[in-house]
């Protein structure tokens, strides 16, 4: 990946804790205090029950590969081929991300494979959580 040309997200007050966590090397999620459901993406209320009693917590960073595609066309900030993946976090939510430190082939990207979070700093304000094979 070529991070300099990559589109960068714009943090909002509702997502700032997530970006601050990534910059600190933590994958931060939210959990509802009423129904205990962990969720992503960040928002000020629980998507399951609507409660505004939510808290931020540091997730384990463990996940499994739920789904992916391998893009064979270059895009700004990416060198083909690269995987666009959905991972299932150990805490329950699914997250769209990229897989790194692994050949970008169907033989290497096995569904349900164990993954762990890694962080790619794009600039002074944005660090992205990405995933790699566990133990890589």
Image: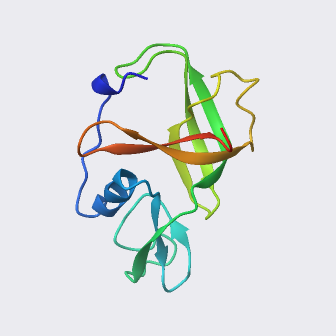
| In front of the other: 130 or 134 | 134
| In front of the other: 65 or 58 | 58
Percent of width and height locating residue 129: 45, 46
- Name the image quarter holding residue 104: top right
Q: Is residue 49 above or below residue 87?
A: below
Percent of width and height locating residue 72: 54, 14
| In front of the other: 99 or 101 | 101
All told, the count of numbered labels is 0
- Name the image quarter holding residue 46: bottom left
Please tell me which residue is depicted at 35% across the width and 44% down the height of the picture.
127
**Residue 110 vs residue 36: left or right?**
right
Q: Is residue 64 above or below residue 69?
A: below
**Residue 5 vs residue 95: left or right?**
left
Please tell me which residue is depicted at 39% across the width and 62% down the height of the picture.
42
Q: Is residue 20 above or below residue 117?
A: below
Please tell me which residue is depicted at 60% across the width and 28% down the height of the picture.
69
Percent of width and height locating residue 24: 37, 56
> Split into 4 quadrants, where in the image is the C terminus?
top right
Q: Which residue lies furthest to the bottom in this view?
A: 34
**Residue 62 vs residue 1: left or right?**
right
**Residue 51 vs residue 65: left or right?**
left
Please tell me which residue is depicted at 68% across the width and 21% down the height of the picture.
105
Q: In this view, does 44 lie above or below 13?
A: below
């Amino acid at each position: 990946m070529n991070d300099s040309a990559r589109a960068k997200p714009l943090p909002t007050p509702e997502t700032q804790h997530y970006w601050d966590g990534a910059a600190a090397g933590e994958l931060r999620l939210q959990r509802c205090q009423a129904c205990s459901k962990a969720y992503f993406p960040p928002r000020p209320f629980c998507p399951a029950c609507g409660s505004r009693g939510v808290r931020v917590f540091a997730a384990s960073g463990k996940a499994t590969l739920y789904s992916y595609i391998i893009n064979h066309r270059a895009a700004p900030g990416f060198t083909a081929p690269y995987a666009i993946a959905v991972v299932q976090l150990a805490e329950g939510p699914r997250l769209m991300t990229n897989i790194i430190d692994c050949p970008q082939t169907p033989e290497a990207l096995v569904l349900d494979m164990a993954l762990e979070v890694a962080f790619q700093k794009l600039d002074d304000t944005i660090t992205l959580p990405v995933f790699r094979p566990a133990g890589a």
